[in-house]
Image: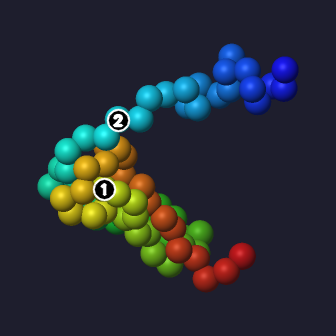
Amino acid sequence: MDKKDNPNDWPVWANESVEIVNANPDWQDKGRCEEQQLYELLAPLGIRKVIHIGSTSIPGLPAKPIIDLMAEIDSF
């Protein structure tokens, strides 16, 4: 049996259940707050912008209750 076929060898996160919850109107505000905080930390490293992405960034959409962020840079 290949290691990838044995669930006992998988990382813990690979076995976690996925929870989808009703849309939360606070997600957009939380996303903006996290964007700003992360930008302030990363701007000295050349980050141009931090963007709230994913399902919690779409008003009214049920989603996993996780705020996803993406950092934008000029290039590598």
Residue drawn at the location 67% of the way across and 21% of the way down:
7
Q: From mark 2 to mark 1, how far is it between C-alphas?
A: 13 Å
Single out the mark in the foreground, 2 or 1: 2
Question: In the picture, which quadrant includes the N terminus?
Answer: top right
**Residue density around tag 2, few if under 14, some if 14–19, many if 20 or more, within 10 Å:** few
- In the rendered image, is residue 33 in sight? no
Q: Quadrant of residue 75?
A: bottom right
> Along the horizontal axis of the image, is 27 left or right of 1?
left
The answer to whether 65 appears left or right of 50 in the picture is left
Residue ID for mark 1: 56
Q: Amino acid at mark 1?
A: Thr
Q: For the point 75% across and 26% down, which residue is it? A: 5
Q: Residue at x 41, y 35 (%)?
A: 18
Can you tell which quarter of the image residue 38 is in? bottom left
In the foreground, 43 or 27: 27
Q: Residue at x 44, y 29 (%)?
A: 17
Q: Which quadrant of the figure contains the C terminus? A: bottom right
Query: Is there any visible trace of residue 63 in the rendered image?
Result: yes
- Circle 1 residues within 10 Å: few <14, some 14–19, many ≥20: many
The disc, 2 or 1, on the residue closer to the chain's N-terminal end is 2
Task: Spot the residue most to the bottom.
Answer: 74
Can you give x and y, in whole percent of width and height, for residue 39 in the image?
43, 67
Relative image position of residue 47 (x, y in whole percent): 54, 73
Could you say where residue 56 lies in the image, as x and y percent from the top left? Answer: 31, 56
**Percent coordinates x, y for residue 63 in the rendering:** 31, 48
Which is nearer the eye, 5 or 50?
A: 5
Q: Nearer the viewer, residue 36 or 1?
A: 1
Circle 2 residue: 19
Farthest residue to the right: give it: 1
Left or right, 5 with respect to 50, comes to right
Confirm or deny contact between disc 2 and disc 1 (CB under 8 A): no
